[in-house]
Image (cartoon, rainbow, N blue to C red):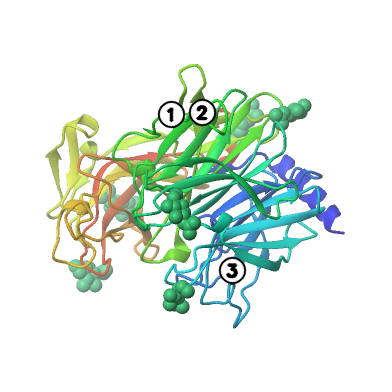
Amino acid sequence: MFFTIHVLCASLATLVGAKYIVPGARWLDTDGNLVNAHAGCITTDPDTGRFYLFGEYKVEGQVEGGGVSVYSSDDLATWEHHGQALQPIEGHPYISPQNVIQRPKVVWSDASKQYHMWWHADNSTYGLLLQGLATADTISGPYTFLSATAPLGNWSQDFGMFTDYKDGRSYALYSNGDRKEGRDVYLTSYNEEVSALDSVVHRFDKYDLEAPTIIQTDKSYYALMSHKTGYRPNNVVVFRADSLAGPWSQPSFVSPLNTRTFNSQSGFALRINGSAQTTFLYIGDQWDSNSLWESRYIWLPMHIDDDKKTLEIEWHDIYDLDVHTGKWKAIRGRSYYAHDAKVNGNAFKQEASFASGNTIVTGIYGNDSTVTFEGIEGTGKPQWVSFYYQNTDDMGFGDQPGGSPDRIGGTWQLRRISSVVVNGDEDNVQTLFQRDTHKSIILSTPLLLNLNKGKNNNITVGGLYNGFDYKGADLDRIVVYPPEAASNGTKW
Ligand SMILES: *[C@@H]1O[C@H](CO)[C@@H](O)[C@H](O)[C@H]1NC(C)=O
Ligand SMILES: *[C@@H]1O[C@H](CO)[C@@H](O)[C@H](O)[C@H]1NC(C)=O
Ligand SMILES: *[C@@H]1O[C@H](CO)[C@@H](O)[C@H](O)[C@H]1NC(C)=O
Ligand SMILES: *[C@@H]1O[C@H](CO)[C@@H](O)[C@H](O)[C@H]1NC(C)=O
Ligand SMILES: *[C@@H]1O[C@H](CO)[C@@H](O)[C@H](O)[C@H]1NC(C)=O
Ligand SMILES: *[C@@H]1O[C@H](CO)[C@@H](O)[C@H](O)[C@H]1NC(C)=O
């Protein structure tokens, strides 16, 4: 029965056509709920080729306790929820609702003929620093808790897992905590059953990094890790080696400097061995420390050049990926610039050498200091619109809650929220979260909007209250994308 449903989904997906992947959007599952599976992994069912997304299930208003959720998909864009793969158990020493169950990874153990789930098992003050193991006969579980152990006697914090496609061997990656004696990232092989660790293959010594993952090409291994800034993103780095034992290269950045890896943290990477090409996806988290359960996902293609020995993550607002051929293409949209837009109230255009046409619109505030983009062409179908913005709150308001990570003693929070109104329809105000960027760094964040068919749409952006202020972020431009049905290259 289960099998039949999967086959049906596969044919349905083929009929409807590939779906867009929209990094940073609110991703809804097939029931219309937010996809809630953070810092996890994607495991492919070897029999059906279906993708299973496992991740931390975040309960609204809580940091710990949600267990591990599981979703499945044939195209990496449409996700069906299968509930909890690992359910917290009240009073349990390692998987109670008060425990930390982080960064779950799932692999098939051919020796035990079961799926094995491993994760960072801890208490809420990170005093245990263990690795949990649970097993299941079917990929979506439910998984049964087996153990929580210290890896070869050491500490284990952020956890990753990697399986080498050349010999099927699996490895654990873990940072050994924040203490001065720790601050390493270990790469350690599993036994054949993937039921216990075997021996240390390499130690990334004293780099003080976390959120590790490895991606493999025919010639190289690339290990991605983030710095340690909690739920606030930073510039992720990559190490390269010919073999897992090393020698490993020096770390280098994977994205344009100060974009903080397009506002995301590393955690997993997916290799798609397509019939036409191999595609490598960065599977990152865009944490929202104000509301962890609403944290979003930044999945992007990685450009790997094994001759130059480089790996770069490429930003695309939207791309269309065919998981069978491995081919993907960035969707092209039409830009409407803030320097051509109409400013209202105290919003104004300011010289900015890093912005489009040397101009950015700033002073967006509340509902009377707004900017209106006019003459926007729409199709009458829901369309993704990306808002390119700058939010420099990282350097201001040091004495206020939520200000200044780039200042001694500073903390970070999502600071600005804009209102987006289409064609003056004040009854349908859309909420646009604009995380801090950096001075002169412009990033984008998307919303799905309903524009009328024709060229006379307008979009007005103002500021909404974020707990501190009514300030909207500065705007550079918006990019309006064709609806998914027209992703066949047809000019629109
Ligand atoms: C977590 O475990 C450590 C080590 O056993 C202990 O010192 C600490 O009190 C524990 N924290 C909580 C919240 O139980
Ligand atoms: C863990 O490893 C570090 C070095 O990476 C070492 O200094 C420390 O003693 C080890 N801790 C334990 C508990 O084995
Ligand atoms: C990639 O897929 C092809 C079949 O499409 C298979 O023959 C090949 O072994 C796969 N390669 C790897 C490295 O998984
Ligand atoms: C306009 O914004 C002000 C705060 O600047 C707020 O008090 C008022 O409720 C808003 N009005 C509407 C109609 O949203
Ligand atoms: C935006 O469109 C609405 C509906 O067509 C119209 O009432 C309004 O005047 C327009 N606003 C601007 C600033 O063009
Ligand atoms: C592509 O999609 C558009 C919009 O759905 C349609 O009008 C057009 O005929 C399609 N073109 C091709 C070549 O399939």
The front one of 185 and 431 is 185
Mark earlier in primary sequence (2, 3): 3
Going by the numbered disc 3, the residue's amino acid type is: Gly
Q: Residues within 10 Å of mark 2 (few under 14, many from 20)?
A: some
Image point (55%, 70%), residue name: 66
Can you identify the residue that label 2 sits on? 241
Can you identify the residue that label 1 sits on? 249
The front one of 287 and 480 is 287
Q: Quadrant of ligand 1?
A: bottom left
- Seen in the image, is 203 located left or right of residue 145? left
Could you give the CA–CA distance between mark 3 and mark 1, rounded to whole angstroms? Answer: 36 Å
Disc 3 to disc 1: CB gap under 8 Å: no
Observer able to see residue 86 = yes
Going by the numbered disc 1, the residue's amino acid type is: Ser
Q: Is label 2 in a helix, a strand or a loop?
A: strand
The front one of 68 and 194 is 194
Say if 15 sits above or below 174 in the image. above
Image point (22%, 34%), residue name: 355
| Rendered image quadrant of residue 134 | bottom right
Q: Is mark 2 within 8 Å of ligand 3?
A: no
Going by the numbered disc 2, the residue's amino acid type is: Ala
Could you give the CA–CA distance between mark 1 and mark 2, rounded to whole angstroms? Answer: 6 Å
Between disc 3 and disc 1, the foreground one is 1
Q: Residues within 10 Å of mark 1 (few under 14, many from 20)?
A: some
Q: Is label 3 in a helix, a strand or a loop?
A: loop
Could you give the CA–CA distance between mark 2 and mark 3, rounded to whole angstroms? Answer: 34 Å
Image point (32%, 41%), residue name: 259
Where residue 67 is drawn, which disc sits there? 3
- Seen in the image, is 379 located left or right of residue 347? right
Q: Is label 1 in a helix, a strand or a loop?
A: loop
- Seen in the image, is 1 located left or right of residue 172? right
